[in-house]
């Protein structure tokens, strides 16, 4: 048919602006949520009270200071005269000694104590670790330490004790004595030696507590 034209139809359900409109609403919602979170963080910073932190820090400082004064007053300071407790305590380092702790409790295995051998007041102070307790049987065999026939496994016991000394044979610890040993396995000035032997309870001056010198060893003694 001449002159006939196909009727053109248009989609009335197509709206390219609609997806953008929906996305815009979604973005606006996300922006509002983000702004709300930022305002909350800002409010937290605004309500941050430096005075509270200062009081908290002051209380900690006072507590630490009182602890030092307490031990300093009721305890004493000594100087290590050997490398028996190396590397934790080195030769010529100052050590704070807690003389009060053993008034309330008894020395226990693993404690580092300060004593004078055989209670000799003219002798120097020694710093050693308690290994054997009163009434126990102790022996060192092939570099290993045995308590009542059972090997003692602890982080502070040397893996291979160089010399057994008096503990080469089984030895019974008296009811008021302790067997002490050096952390430094090459230092034999402890209960393995005849000039020191077992340490009586009355000979224990106190517990080694703190190294105040400015060095890598500064801090509490473990």
Image (spheres, grey):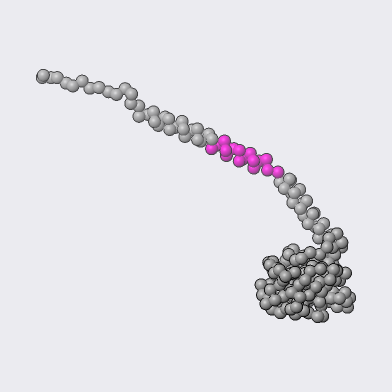
Residue at 67 percent of width and 40 percent of height = 47
From the top left corner, tell me how far across and down residue 181 is, in percent: 75, 73
Residue 125 position (above or below residue 42): below
Q: Quadrant of residue 96?
A: bottom right
Tell which of 183 and 169 is nearer to you.
169
Residue 174 in view: yes
Residue at 72% from the left image edge and 66% from the top image edge: 218
Residue 156 at x, y percent in the picture: 70, 68
Look at 47% across and 34% down and name the residue there.
27
Q: In the image shown, does 11 or 101 lie closer to the viewer?
A: 101
Is 46 colored magenta in this rendering?
yes
Furthest toward the front, the residue is: 149
What residue lies at 71% left-to-right and 72% top-to-bottom?
145
Q: Residue 219 at what x, y percent from top left?
A: 73, 64
Residue 206 located within the stretch drawn in magenta: no
Q: Quadrant of residue 185?
A: bottom right
Instruction: Write down the quadrant of residue 127 in the picture.
Output: bottom right
The answer to whether any part of residue 161 appears in the image is: no
Residue 142 lies left or right of residue 135; in this view the side is left
Q: Please provide the residue range marked out in magenta.
A: 34-49
Q: Relative to residue 88, is residue 30 drawn left or right?
A: left
């Amino acid at each position: 048919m001449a002159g006939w034209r196909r009727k053109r139809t248009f989609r009335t359900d197509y709206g390219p602006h609609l997806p953008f409109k929906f996305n815009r609403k979604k973005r606006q919602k996300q922006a509002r949520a983000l702004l709300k979170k930022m305002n909350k963080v800002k409010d937290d910073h605004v309500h941050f009270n430096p005075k509270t932190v200062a009081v908290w820090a002051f209380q900690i400082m006072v507590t630490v200071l009182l602890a030092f004064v307490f031990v300093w007053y009721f305890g004493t300071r000594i100087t290590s005269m050997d490398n028996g407790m190396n590397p934790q305590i080195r030769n010529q380092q100052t050590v704070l000694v807690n003389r009060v702790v053993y008034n309330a409790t008894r020395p226990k295995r693993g404690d580092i104590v300060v004593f004078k051998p055989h209670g000799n007041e003219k002798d120097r102070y020694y710093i050693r670790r308690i290994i054997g307790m009163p009434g126990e049987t102790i022996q060192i065999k092939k570099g290993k330490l045995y308590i009542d026939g059972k090997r003692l496994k602890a982080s502070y016991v040397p893996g291979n004790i160089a010399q057994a000394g008096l503990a080469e044979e089984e030895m019974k610890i008296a009811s008021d004595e302790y067997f002490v040993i050096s952390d430094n396995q090459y230092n034999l000035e402890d209960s393995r030696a005849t000039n020191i032997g077992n340490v009586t309870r009355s000979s224990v001056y106190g517990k080694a507590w703190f190294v105040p010198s400015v060095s890598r060893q500064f801090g509490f003694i473990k």
